[in-house]
Amino acid sequence: MISSDIIKQKALEYGADLCGIGDVRLYEGSPPQRDPRFIQPKAAAVIGVALRVPRGIYRGILEGTQHYTYTSLGVKALSEEVVGAFLLKMARVIENEGYEACIQRSAPGLRIKDDMDTNPEVTATRRLIHTEPVGPGKPAPEVILDETQSAVICGLGTPGYRGNVLTPEFGPFQRFAFIVTNAPLAPDPVITESLCDQCGACADACPGKAICGSERTLVVGECAFPYGSWDTWQCSVYYRGAHRSNPFMPADFLRDHPEREAILSGEKRFSREEALAIYDRLKFLPNTHYGYVPCLCGKACDTACYAHLERKGLIRKKFAMGFISEPATGGRP
Ligand code: SF4
Ligand code: SF4
């Protein structure tokens, strides 16, 4: 007999670090292209899992001496290999009991129709894909769950300032996957108190000033979580290393560019077109498999956030040593 307890026990056994169950009714009012009921019309629950990105993966970045492990293991391996195997095993558990498991991994190569904002993490997202609704009252494919909304609905965490998810266990250091199912699973409560205190440390740390001020709100049931705005095109340029603290940048980088100083200092504001135009000059390291772009901003937003939450005693997973003693600065000298 399937139950929430059995699902959680299996999720942890198969490698998840956190598992929560969300009530699918909490998606009421969501854009259809974000609503799991347009994937499985009989959906009753969404199972959410978090897989931690080991804290030690960020250590070489903080030291300034090693950058490739974050992208290759913290992003690509988790999202493309570990999560895939995990979800397929979970699907067997659910479907052995006679319920469907619509397994949902991250989709960095895809966007919902007309979404011009999503961070183009892999090459395929550079261009919009043409798509039309497949029938009256149906959204255009692909329907893709909103990761932050879904993690909040599953009781795993609350929104950070740039709209990512913070969990009490790991702060911003994890990746997520979901299963939409018609299995009648008891939901977990939503975490009502936001971990994010809007301190701004993440925004200050970003070398591209990609996290800006204007407020958005995520409403889940009775809860409203305010968060800031995140310019993902600006982020994509500085994630790729267009800033002075990138240790792989040659001295003559962009020497012929009229806006070189503004770009290197993070003052330049990139439109979508300008971001796409400069990508070819931001090839400091080879892409990893599946087209993942090497992270050369050091995920300064997340490391600053983690350090802030740890100082406040808000990270449940304890370590023998503190993460950093000073706030991250967006790259080390
Ligand atoms: S620190 Fe990096 S990942 Fe974070 S917002 Fe800035 S460029 Fe993007
Ligand atoms: S550093 Fe963390 S807690 Fe502070 S504003 Fe950013 S997301 Fe919120």
Image (cartoon, rainbow, N blue to C red):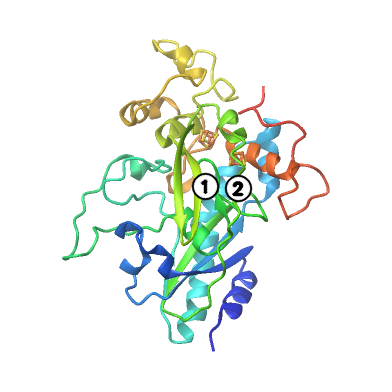
**x then y, percent, for residue 148:** 48, 53
Within-10-Å neighbours for mark 2: few <14, some 14–19, many 20+ = many
Give the residue drawn at x 34%, y 72%.
40
User: What residue does disc 2 label?
Assistant: 172
**x then y, percent, for residue 260:** 45, 13
Q: Quadrant of residue 104?
A: bottom left
Cα–Cα span, label 2 and label 1: 7 Å
Of all residues shown, which one is farthest toward the left?
136
Mark 1 and ligand 2: say if the CB distance to the nearest ligand atom is below 8 Å: yes
**Which numbered disc covers residue 164?**
1
Within-10-Å neighbours for mark 1: few <14, some 14–19, many 20+ = some
Q: Is residue 329 above or below residue 192?
A: above
Mark 2 and ligand 2: say if the CB distance to the nearest ligand atom is below 8 Å: yes
Q: Quadrant of residue 142?
A: bottom left
**Which numbered disc covers residue 156?**
none
Q: Amino acid at mark 1?
A: Asn
Secondary structure category for the residue under label 2 = loop
